[in-house]
Image (spheres, rainbow, N blue to C red):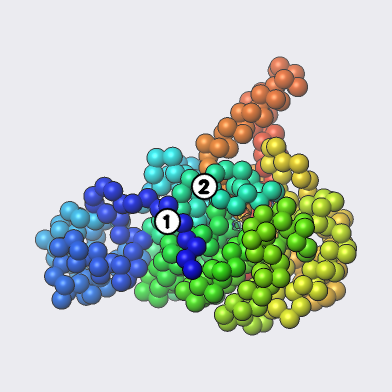
C-alpha cells in the first residue's frame, strides 16, 4: 500500500527543471517536449545526464558536444537552475549550513559536516515541516507545508557540491562522501521523491555516491520499510528513543500505529542487513524520561539478533519544550552499559555549534524567527533594558544547541 502523501508542487511554469528526473523520466520529458526525436531520446538523455550530474552545469550552452540549435530547443523547454541560497554559514569546525529557498515560502536547511563517514556528510531534508508531532522534536511543532520534490532534494546535494568545488564528480579525495536524510521531515512519507533523488545521486555517471553511504532515518513507518530497501538499497536508521510502547507512544506518536514489536519485525526483514550493513538506532537522551540503566539493558535485549549500531543523541532543547537533556554522567553510564554489550562509542560530539547547525530538528527560517522574537520579548521583560541585540543572539545560540553530530553516528 502506498503511504506517500502527494503534496509535491506541480511544476506549473515553463521551462521545467529537469535536474530531479531519473534517466527514464528524462527520456520521457525530452520526448514529451518535442525537442528530441524519440529515436534519439536515449542518446540525448545520456549526453544531458552527464553534463548535469557529472559536470554539474546549469547552462545548456556549456554542453559542448550538443549542437547549438539542439541546445536552443532545450533552453526553450527546460531549466537547470539551482535554487537561491538565502544564507550560507561556515562554523569554526568546518561545518557548513545552507538555507535554501526552493520556492516562495519553501525554505530548507541542509548541513555539511566534515570528517564524518568516509570524508564528510550532508544532512538533507525531505519535507518542509512534518506530520508526525514527535513530542521532543522542533520540526514536529511545525505543520507539514509540503513534500520536497526530487529536484529539491537533489538540489541540496548540488548546492553543497557547488560550494565544496566538487564538479566534475571527483573519483578520489571527495569532501562530500555521505548523505543522511535527517533534516526536516519523514522521508518514508515522501518515498517516491526520496527514491528518485537517491537514484540520481547514486548514479555512476553522475554524483556517484555509494548507496551504502546514503542513510535514511525514519520514525518507524513500518509498511514502507520493504519498499525503502528494495527501491533505494539505502542504509536504514530508526528513531527508536524508547524501549516500551507506553513511553514511545508519547515520544513518537506514530508508535500507536506501528508499535515496537511490529517495528522490530519490519527492521529484521529489511533487505541486505549484515554486520557490514547495520541498522542505526537513534536514541535521544531525555533527562528522567528514557535514560535509566534499566532502559539501556532493555535496549540491548530489544536489539538482540539485529546487526545494529546505536547513536545516543544528547537532546537538543528548543524554546517551549518541557524536556531536558540527560546529565552527561547519565549519558556516559547509559553508554557504558551498551559498550559492555559490544556497541562501541555511541555518544557523538556536537558539531557546528557556533552556526546552529541543528541537523535533525530543522525548522524553516520564518518559524525560527518567530520563535526567537517570542523569546526575545520574554527576555526583554525579565532582563535589564540595556541588553544588546548581539547578546540576545548569543542567548539564542545557547538555546539551540546543535546536534549535527547525529549524522556522525549514522556512519561512523
Ligand atoms: N523524521 C525522521 C528524520 C528526521 S529527524 C526521523 O524521525 O527519524 C532526525 C533525527 O533527529 C531523529 O532521530 C529525531 O528523533 C532526532 N531529533 C529530533 N528532534 C531532536 C532534538 N530536539 N534533540 C535531539 N534529537 C532530535
Ligand atoms: Fe517528524 Fe522526525 Fe521530528 Fe518526528 S522526529 S516530528 S518524524 S522530523
Helix, strand or loop at disc 1? loop
Q: Residue 286: x percent and y percent? A: 78, 52
How far apart, in angstroms, are the residues tagged by discs 1 and 2? 12 Å
Crowdedness near tag 1: few (<14), some (14–19) or many (≥20) residues, C-alpha within 10 Å: few
Q: Name the mark on residue 6.
A: 1
Residue 399 sits above or below residue 71 on the image: above
Crowdedness near tag 2: few (<14), some (14–19) or many (≥20) residues, C-alpha within 10 Å: some
What residue do we see at 87% from left, 55% from top?
A: 329
Q: Residue 254: x percent and y percent? A: 64, 57
Name the residue beneath numbered marker 2.
144
Residue 213 in sight here: no
Q: Report the front residue among 402 and 315.
A: 315
Q: Report the front residue among 97 and 245.
A: 245
Q: Residue 374: x percent and y percent? A: 64, 28
Helix, strand or loop at disc 2? loop
Q: Residue 390: x percent and y percent? A: 64, 29
Quarter-of-image position of residue 259: bottom right
The reply to whether callout 1 and callout 2 are in contact (CB within 8 Å) is: no
What residue do we see at 49% from left, 77% from top?
A: 230
Quarter-of-image position of residue 22: bottom left
What residue do we see at 47% from left, 74% from top?
A: 231
Amino acid at each position: 500500500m502506498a503511504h506517500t502523501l502527494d503534496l509535491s508542487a506541480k511544476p506549473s511554469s515553463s521551462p521545467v527543471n529537469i535536474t530531479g528526473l531519473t534517466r527514464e523520466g528524462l527520456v520521457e520529458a525530452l520526448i514529451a517536449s518535442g525537442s528530441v526525436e524519440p529515436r534519439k531520446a536515449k542518446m540525448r538523455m545520456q549526453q544531458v545526464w552527464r553534463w548535469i550530474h557529472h559536470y554539474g552545469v546549469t547552462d545548456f550552452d556549456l554542453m559542448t558536444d550538443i549542437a547549438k540549435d539542439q541546445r536552443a530547443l532545450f533552453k526553450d523547454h527546460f531549466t537547470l537552475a539551482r535554487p537561491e541560497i538565502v544564507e550560507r554559514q561556515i562554523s569554526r569546525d568546518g561545518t557548513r549550513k545552507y538555507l535554501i529557498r526552493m520556492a516562495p515560502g519553501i525554505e530548507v536547511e541542509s548541513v555539511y559536516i566534515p570528517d564524518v563517514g568516509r570524508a564528510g556528510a550532508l544532512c538533507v531534508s525531505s519535507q518542509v515541516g512534518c506530520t508526525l508531532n514527535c513530542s521532543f522534536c522542533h520540526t514536529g511543532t511545525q505543520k507539514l507545508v509540503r513534500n520536497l520534490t526530487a529536484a529539491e532534494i537533489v538540489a541540496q546535494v548540488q548546492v553543497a557540491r557547488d560550494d565544496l568545488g566538487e564538479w566534475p564528480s571527483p573519483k578520489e579525495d571527495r569532501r562530500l562522501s555521505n548523505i543522511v536524510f535527517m533534516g526536516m521531515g519523514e522521508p518514508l512519507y515522501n518515498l517516491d521523491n526520496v527514491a528518485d533523488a537517491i537514484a540520481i545521486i547514486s548514479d555512476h555517471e553522475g554524483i556517484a555516491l555509494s548507496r551504502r553511504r546514503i542513510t535514511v532515518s525514519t520514525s518507524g513507518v513500518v509498511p514502507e520499510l520493504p519498499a525503502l530497501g528494495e527501491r533505494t538499497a539505502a542504509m536504514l536508521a530508526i528513531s527508536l528513543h524508547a524501549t516500551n510502547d507506553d513511553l514511545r507512544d508519547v515520544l513518537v506518536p506514530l508508535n500507536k500505529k506501528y508499535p515496537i514489536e511490529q517495528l522490530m519485525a519490519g527492521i529484521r526483514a529489511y533487505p541486505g542487513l549484515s554486520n557490514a550493513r547495520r541498522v542505526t538506532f537513534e536514541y535521544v537522551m531525555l533527562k528522567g524520561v528514557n535514560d535509566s540503566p534499566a532502559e539501556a539493558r532493555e535496549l540491548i535485549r530489544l536489539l538482540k539478533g539485529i546487526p545494529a549500531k546505536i547513536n545516543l543523541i544528547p537532546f537538543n532543547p528548543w524554546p517551549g519544550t518541557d524536556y531536558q537533556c540527560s546529565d552527561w554522567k547519565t549519558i556516559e553510564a547509559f553508554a557504558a552499559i551498551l559498550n559492555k554489550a559490544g556497541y562501541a562509542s555511541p555518544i557523538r560530539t556536537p558539531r557546528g555549534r557556533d552556526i546552529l547547525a541543528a541537523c535533525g530538528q530543522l525548522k524553516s527560517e520564518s518559524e525560527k524567527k518567530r520563535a526567537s522574537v517570542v523569546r526575545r520579548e520574554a527576555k526583554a521583560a525579565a532582563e535589564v533594558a540595556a541588553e544588546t541585540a548581539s547578546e540576545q543572539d548569543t542567548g539564542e545560540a545557547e538555546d539551540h544547541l546543535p546536534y549535527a553530530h547525529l549524522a556522525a553516528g549514522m556512519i561512523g
